Amino acid sequence: MIAFAQIQLGCGETAVCMRCHPERAVSMFPAEQVVAAVGRAAAEWGAGPGPNVSFVGAEPFAHPALVRLVNAAVQAGCERIRLRTDGGALFVGGNAAGVVQAGVRHVELVLLAGDSVTHDGLADRPGLFEAAISGAGAFTEAARVVGEHVSVTGLVRVCRHNAPHLSSAVLALAKAGAVSVLVERAEGFMLPSATLAEALRVATVAGVALHGDGVSPFSAEPWTVREVAV
Amino acid sequence: MSAAQERLVVALVGVSTPGYRSLANAYLRESIKSDIRLPETWITTPDFDTATDPWWIAYQILDLDPAPDVVGFSVVCWNARSVFEAVRVIKAVRPQTYVVVGGPEVGPLAEDSLAEQPGIDAVVRGEGEFALPDLVYSLVRGGSPGSTPGVTAREGGRVESGPSRPEIENLDDVASPYPPGVAIPTDGSAYLETYRGCPHACAYCYEGKGSTRIRSFSWDRIASDIERVASEPGMRSISFIDPVFNLTTDRLRRLSDLLAPWADKGLRLHTIEVDIERIDDEQAALLVRAGVVSVETGPQTVGTAALAECRRSLDPSRFLAGVAACKRAGISVECDLIIGLPGDTAEDALSGMRFAFDADPGKVQMSSLHVLPGTDLWVRAEELGLVFDDRPPHELIQTKDMSFGDLRRLEVLGNAASTVYRARLTPVTKGLNL
């Protein structure tokens, strides 16, 4: 299907379960390194739609050179530029319109649950859930205003603390406009098959493609990733 | 309508997908207006879209002054539920209104439509440009609508069918939907057709009605219609509804000759349907010269069993070469895929998606099969194991090879992939200097 070159912006993933990662440390890679990785990804793209890049890892809006990185992807000829974000910064000021204008066409919104109490509690970020949902809306609205097509996708990292909330997280992402949700299991965590089956039902009824290791009933996913070292 | 009368008020009501307009009603309006037997007929053609509440459609029809004696609807699978609901309300308020319908949703099922929709008085089967004026004339002189060729109608408590009407042999006999001196209601775009029929006989499609026969308008008529539409003030684009715009290179060259002067002035052709496997650099150049900016094509499926069941062919290398030729010429391509064709498995559907996205055409559109009245699949549904909703728009429920759940999951997967694919920087936005 459609592939994205996945490029780490730094260490310390955005919106993780703080009960699993209480000592999480965040650091950013130098812009030069990320720009070089973008250049390599574009140059080595090959056949198929693209090049496409997805900035993951540390929260992109916390990277001091985000505008430069997106600009580098545009200049490298990237067609699809995605940010994996906790969404909190999207609703702030003109961030949503700014990233659309800069060239970002995809946002991968990370949720831990489908309600503010659980999500904000696990992320240890009061107010983050409402900001994330509002941020996704601001992104699609900013694109609508300038007549650009964008996509919102979701990521739910499932661990023993939030597994019962998988379906509600999927539903919240669907309401936020996500067309697909990637389920990522914490290392060593076995997701109960009944939980997964329920999430798949909820996703399908909500019009969302659920995918991830062992999730999709099909041998295809709406989009895939290629890791690019930074 | 029981008594003969000299004058009829006819409302031909369009209920189109948002953003579209009924070309059929423009043809029918001009056919009635140009019929010398009907000099006193007053016609209006209000346009609505399927997003409009059917009661609101009924309200506006009932509010017309003078009140229409005859209300006509062109019915396709997409608007059928709205039309039937509007008809129900119109008849409840004003039972004396004569309601006639036509179109692919009801024409092949004329008697069933009358049985299921008590508000409908008559169904025009097949092309309506001569059948409808004949029916109106029959109503004017107090004749028998049910004996009109190409019409099935209520006669007292019975349903009567007139003899079948052959296809219109000379399309130039059909009045132009765009007569001189009449402003074209437009939002900057208009529809045209240069021929009827289809060179393909795909089992899921009603276009060719099982035949590959082509009937073309004359080149004089085509030139006249293009001139008339393109010269309309404010006209920016034309959509040709020909099933295959590039039937032959010679024909495409003539169309390009006719359209090039208008293309030079900025007129554009959007989403014209093409046989992509015929397109090489020469055809692509002719398309550009004609003002074409985007084309729509298959492959519908890549599964060999489904291609055979649907009487379609696919040469993947020629298909990809056609897409590449269009892209080199700057033409955006929309690839269409149908999920759930008989013979296709879920894996075939996924292979189709991979094929379409790998071609990187510009847009990929996926939709589940709709089993349409009058098509080969409608007739053979049971044999082929197709289970579908018998109510319009006749969505597929399941097949022998795809469960209900598989189909729904493929739909959402296809929508997600299409959305992710479509969200990209265009050449214009790529050039944005940050």
Image (tube, helix red, strand yellow):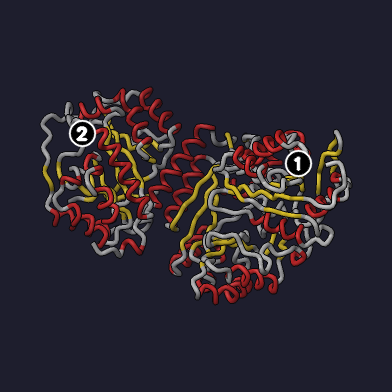
Residue found 35% across the figure and 37% down from its top: A176
Q: In this view, does A3 lie above or below B58?
A: below
> Does B364 sit left or right of B389 as displayed?
left
Q: Quadrant of residue B378?
A: top right
Query: Residue drawn 50% across and 75% down?
Result: B264
Secondary-structure class at tag 2? loop
Neighbours of disc 2 within 10 Å: few (<14), some (14-19), many (20+): many
Q: How far apart are marks 2 and 1 (CA)?
A: 66 Å
- Name which residue type carries label 1: Thr
Could you say where residue B320 lies in the image, as x and y percent from the top left?
Answer: 48, 61
Q: Please give the chain letter of the residue carrying mark 2.
A: A
Which residue sits at x=38%, y=52%? A149
Across and down, in percent, residue B421 comes to 39, 51
Mark 2 vs mark 1, foreground winner is 1
Q: Quadrant of the image for the N terminus of chain B? A: top right
Question: Relative to B377, does residue A165 appear above or below in the rendering?
Answer: above
Q: Quadrant of the C terminus of chain B?
A: bottom left
**Chain letter of disc 1 in the image:** B
Q: Where is residue A11 in the image (x, y as percent from the top left)?
A: 14, 42
Judge from the rendering whether residue B290 lies leftward or rightward of residue B210; answer left or right: left
In the rendered image, which residue does mark 1 sit on? Answer: B97
| Nearer to us in this view, B207 or B344 | B207
Q: What residue type is labelled 2?
A: Val
Q: For mark 2, what is the residue?
A: A16
